[in-house]
């Protein structure tokens, strides 16, 4: 038994002078294997072909919030409501502001990955409590 695959192949019959059928079979197996690996890598990718475009998951006070990548591309000034939390993506500042049901605020840093013209995705860091003051969550967010 040999632990090195290349040496094992050479010892098992891939030597000079043998038929090209073995070489063709090996080449076909390698091509098929690489095609399957590429298909599996793109399985979780979005339709635009960006493998990094995955849902963003945040955990705040034991609750898990899941944001789609579409949240970061909308130009609406309105916050997004998810399970009584208001999420405000500040893409120009690379921040994600989250306002809880009691008015407490968290911020998470955003990281933007760009590859080419069509592949752009965002990741969010761990949310940090910014304001522990209980206030009306519908209050305007001007100078926070």
Image (cartoon, rainbow, N blue to C red):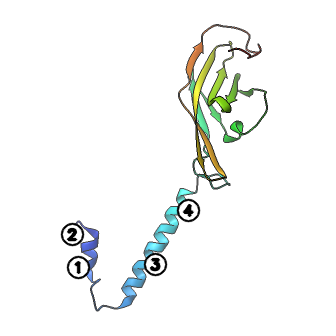
Q: Which mark is residue 83?
A: none
Give the secondary structure at mark 4: helix
Q: Is residue 61 above or below residue 119?
A: above
Q: Which mark is residue 2?
A: 2
Alpha carbon separation for disc pair 1 and 2: 9 Å
| Res. 72 image quadrant | top right
Q: CA distance from mark 2 to mark 3?
A: 24 Å
Q: Position of residue 75 (x, y in %)?
A: 77, 35
Image mark for residue 28: 3
Work out whether residue 83 can be spotted.
Answer: no
Q: Earlier in the sequence, mark 3 or mark 1?
A: 1
**Quarter in which the N terminus is drawn:** bottom left
In the figure, is residue 108 to the left or right of 142? left
Above-or-below relation of 3 to 123: below
- Is residue 132 shown above or below 33? above
- The residue indicated by pointer 4 is 39
**Residue drawn at (54%, 30%) of the image:** 125
Q: Can the viewer see residue 132?
A: yes
How busy is the neighbourhood of tag 3: few (under 14 within 10 Å), some, or many (20 plus)? few
- Mark 2 Cα shell of 10 Å, populated few (<14), some (14-19), many (≥20): few
Q: Answer left or right for 46 relative to 15.
A: right
């Amino acid at each position: 038994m040999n632990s090195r695959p290349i040496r094992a192949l050479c010892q098992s019959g891939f030597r000079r002078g043998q038929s090209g059928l073995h070489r063709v079979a090996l080449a076909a197996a390698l091509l098929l294997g690489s095609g399957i690996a590429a298909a599996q890598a793109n399985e979780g990718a979005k339709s635009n072909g960006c493998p990094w475009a995955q849902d963003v998951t945040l955990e705040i006070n034991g609750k898990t919030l899941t944001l789609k990548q579409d949240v970061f591309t909308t130009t609406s000034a309105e916050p997004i409501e998810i399970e009584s939390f208001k999420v405000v993506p500040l893409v120009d500042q690379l921040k994600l502001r989250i306002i809880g049901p009691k008015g407490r605020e968290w911020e998470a840093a955003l990281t933007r990955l760009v590859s080419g013209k069509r592949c752009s995705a965002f990741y969010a860091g761990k949310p940090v409590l910014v304001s522990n003051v209980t206030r009306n969550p519908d209050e305007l967010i001007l100078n926070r």
